[in-house]
Amino acid sequence: MKVYKYALPGAGILLSATGCILAFTQIPESVGRAVLLIILLLFGILDMGYYFYFRRKFIDFSEEVCCHAERIMRNEEDRTQHNQETLVSKVVMELEKMDEVMQSRLSESSREKENLQKIISDTAHQVKTPLTSIRMYHDMLSDPDTDVNEKERFMDIIRQQLEKLEFLIDSLIKSSRLENDMIRLNMENSSVFHTLEISLNGMITKAERKKIDITIHCNPAVKVMHDAKWTAEALGNILDNAVKYTPERGNIRIDVIPGEMYVEIKIQDTGKGIAAGSYNDIFKRFYREASVSKEEGLGLGLYISRNIISLQGGYIMVHSVPGQGSSFSIFLPNRKNI
Amino acid sequence: MNILQTTNLTKYYGEEPVQVKALDGITLAVEQGSFTAIVGTSGSGKSTLLHMLGGLDTPTGGSVMVDGQELCRMKRSELTIFRRRKIGFVFQNYNLIPNLTVYDNIVLPVELDGRSVDISYFHEITAVLGLSDKLQRKPNKLSGGQQQRAAIARALITKPAILLTDEPTGNLDSHTSQEVIGLLQAAGKKFHQTIVMITHNDEIAQIADRIIRIEDGRLAESRW
């Protein structure tokens, strides 16, 4: 095809040039003009031939590309067009790439939809339980036959369930804001010990009730760039779990270990432990191991903690031996190195 | 966008009846920018898989596609160039050149390719990995963790399509391991780098976005 591309017009031009030169230099006038005319005619025919030939080529090309485009839309594979030197191959490969990009966008979007559906259904499920409880006890309260003491008890239960609902809604809003980066972090180079104190405030009573011993090994001079309030919350969730899943008279040990690039806050407990295969699962939203379904909780604590720490450029790692205990290490970056 | 795709990848050694099936039909796809961990015990085929992904060895069957190009179709010289430009490696043994400074070690792949170093990118990488103040030292003046961080910087400097790493914390103690793996993840996120890590260690695998298990040359369930 390359030969024709250049030969045809080339020949045409050559012929006409030769013809013109000959006509004007060698041959007497009338003959010359006739020859000139013939040359021009030939040239004209050659060019028409050239035009129709390439028009055909373009039509064939576009038909072939359209044919491949249809094939791609039908999801049929055809590897004969891969990595060839032809124009068709180049265009077809680009079309196939484009198809891949669009498919991955589609699947991304359908995954997001599925995820959203799951969140909605999980949330609805979580909300239904306390609501059903409230309705039931409310109905019983409305019953004139209920005695005063029982009424008191029912009111208490309703109050508890309302608190649960509030906690659920708050946690959901929090986790949603974290995910959508709507949180403004107040980063300050402040004492880790101080942040630990805040996080312990929330669970010290529960720990005492279970006679769980808490020891802290932290140099009060250790400082790190972080948002004290949010980090305390993240640590608090982990400590909450530690207390929840450690039996009575167990131990919780907190070590603060400054490193070259990160400061590590290690929380170790002597609780039931986590199987290695579940290390990533426990951080998922609403995830709760089957064995803990009786315990209170939503399955949002670790999910929120991980988000908070990630937003600060850190990460959380778990190490656990089932039956012996777990250790959660929270790493916060040493900003002075960045 | 799948930056890495294998289709029915197999690697057999020997012939029946004494044939060893190191890889037995592995099909996997890795999304650009993700951190994937392939977890398996010794002998599961994970190192063989890494060699296939990096074009360091040829498969018996199936294909490996990196950044849209099939490795099996390349000639040896093409593959060498492709590997140098498109694939970064971090091995268990750091493999830094002992008589070169940290700076020279990191920029080596770029200079071997006859190109000039993107200095601002270089400084970004070394800042994330905490090496900015150690550039003039020789490897023997660095701790194991710092050496591995230099090796990671070296793998990142060419902006490879994928960064392959085999037991990157194998020679490090547990605290340093956690630090190095955290930095690897941070670098991956910051530079939108696709990372594929082979390991037997569930503890460091947890840092990945996705964990795939390999056993007897086959992939077991994939977990997110």
Image: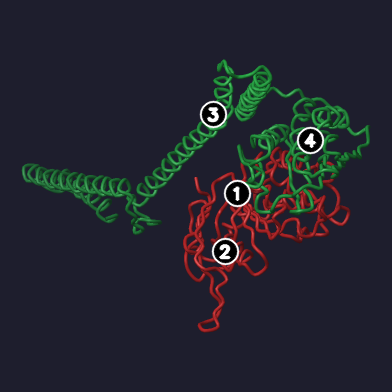
Chain colours: A green, B red
> How far is the residue under mark 3 from the one under mark 2?
52 Å
- Mark 3 belongs to chain: A
Please give the label number shown on residue B210.
Answer: 1
Same-chain status of marks 3 and 1:
no
Same-chain status of marks 2 and 1:
yes
Disc 1 + disc 4, Cβ < 8 Å:
no
Q: Is residue A92 left or right of residue A282?
A: left
- The residue tagged 2 is B52
- Judge the density around disc 4: few (<14), some (14-19), many (≥20) Cα neighbours within 10 Å: some
Q: Is residue A276 left or right of residue A10?
A: right
Q: Is residue B103 left or right of residue A1?
A: right
- In primary-sequence order, the first of circles 2 and 1 is 2
- Judge the density around disc 1: few (<14), some (14-19), many (≥20) Cα neighbours within 10 Å: some
> How far is the residue under mark 4 from the one under mark 2?
36 Å
> How far is the residue under mark 3 from the one under mark 1?
33 Å
**Quarter location, residue A234:** top right
- The residue tagged 4 is A338
- Mark 1 belongs to chain: B
**Quarter location, residue A30:** top left
- Judge the density around disc 2: few (<14), some (14-19), many (≥20) Cα neighbours within 10 Å: many
Picture layout, residue B17 above or below residue B145: below
- The residue tagged 3 is A128
